[in-house]
Image (spheres, rainbow, N blue to C red):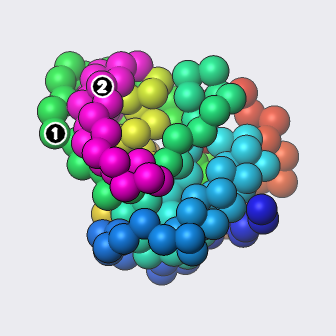
């Protein structure tokens, strides 16, 4: 498969709402495989199709141990609860990390690459990854969930300094 280029903050593709996947095709399965390769190459825990310029409601996420990846087609959060704040990063904003408030647990429904319906419940980091990646499907970046002062400070820093060359050295997870 192939490692693709991840779109960076400022790319209009990251701000568009993704379209539903109409059918699981061989082309879609290739996109999924490329997304998994790209996610692991970038040391991420998740990747949404808009991050590689594919405007479809498709995400891939690593399992809890970061080994096996799972593709979720047309995912929808059907329930969520609790609240927790933790540091997040994003492959589309390399080297940028900030505390983000998210639901502590989520239940979601989607299709797998075989077209079968799946329902998942996740807590903790996995729930955070699902929420982060699904935000990408709606054109939302994690910095949009920050308070305005912090968000503006980050935007000014990006505009002034760009992204850090050694972003991979940060120990927080990039989603």
Residue sitting at 57 percent across and 74 percent down? 27
> Is residue 71 in view?
yes
Does residue 112 sit above or below 62 in this rendering? below
Instruction: Looking at the picture, tell me which residue is in the foreground, 114 or 82.
Output: 114
Instruction: Looking at the picture, tell me which residue is in the foreground, 163 or 52.
Output: 52
> Is residue 9 in view?
no
Q: Which mark is residue 78?
A: 1
Which quadrant holds residue 86?
top left
Does residue 59 sit above or below 158 in this rendering? above
Based on the picture, tell me whether residue 117 belongs to the magenta stretch.
yes
In percent of width and height, residue 148 lies at: 33, 51
Task: Look at the image and tell me in which quarter the C terminus lies.
Answer: top right
Q: Which mark is residue 121?
A: 2
Badge 2: residue crowd in 10 Å (few <14, some 14–19, many ≥20): some
In percent of width and height, residue 20 lies at: 30, 69
Which quadrant holds residue 144?
bottom left
Task: Give left or right: position of 46 versus 152.
Answer: right
Task: Look at the image and tell me in which quarter the N terminus lies.
Answer: bottom right
Q: Which mark is residue 97?
A: none
Based on the picture, tell me whether residue 163 belongs to the magenta stretch.
no
Residue sitting at 15 percent across and 33 percent down? 79
Q: Main secondary structure of the magenta part?
A: strand
Q: Which residues are magenta?
A: 101-124
Q: Are marks 2 and 1 in contact (CB under 8 Å)?
A: no
Badge 1: residue crowd in 10 Å (few <14, some 14–19, many ≥20): few
Residue sitting at 51 percent across and 64 percent down? 49
CA distance separating discs 2 and 1: 10 Å
Task: Give left or right: position of 92 versus 71.
Answer: right
Task: Give left or right: position of 103 versus 21.
Answer: left
In percent of width and height, residue 102 lies at: 31, 32
Task: Give left or right: position of 122 versus 2.
Answer: left
Which of disc 1 and disc 2 is earlier in sequence? 1
């Amino acid at each position: 498969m192939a490692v693709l280029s991840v779109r960076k903050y400022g790319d209009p593709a990251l701000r568009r709402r993704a379209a539903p996947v109409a059918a699981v095709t061989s082309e879609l399965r290739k996109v999924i495989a490329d997304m998994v390769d790209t996610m692991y190459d970038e040391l991420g825990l998740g990747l949404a199709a808009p991050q590689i310029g594919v405007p479809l409601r498709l995400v891939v996420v690593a399992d809890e141990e970061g080994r096996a990846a799972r593709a979720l087609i047309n995912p929808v959060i059907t329930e969520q609860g609790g609240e927790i704040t933790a540091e997040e990063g994003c492959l589309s904003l390399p080297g940028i990390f900030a505390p983000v408030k998210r639901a502590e647990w989520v239940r979601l429904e989607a299709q797998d690459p075989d077209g079968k319906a799946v329902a998942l419940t996740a807590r903790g980091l996995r729930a955070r990854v699902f929420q982060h990646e699904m935000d990408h499907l709606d054109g939302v970046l994690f910095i949009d969930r920050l308070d305005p002062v912090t968000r503006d400070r980050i935007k000014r820093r990006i505009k002034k300094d760009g992204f850090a060359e050694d972003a991979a050295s940060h120990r927080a997870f990039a989603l």
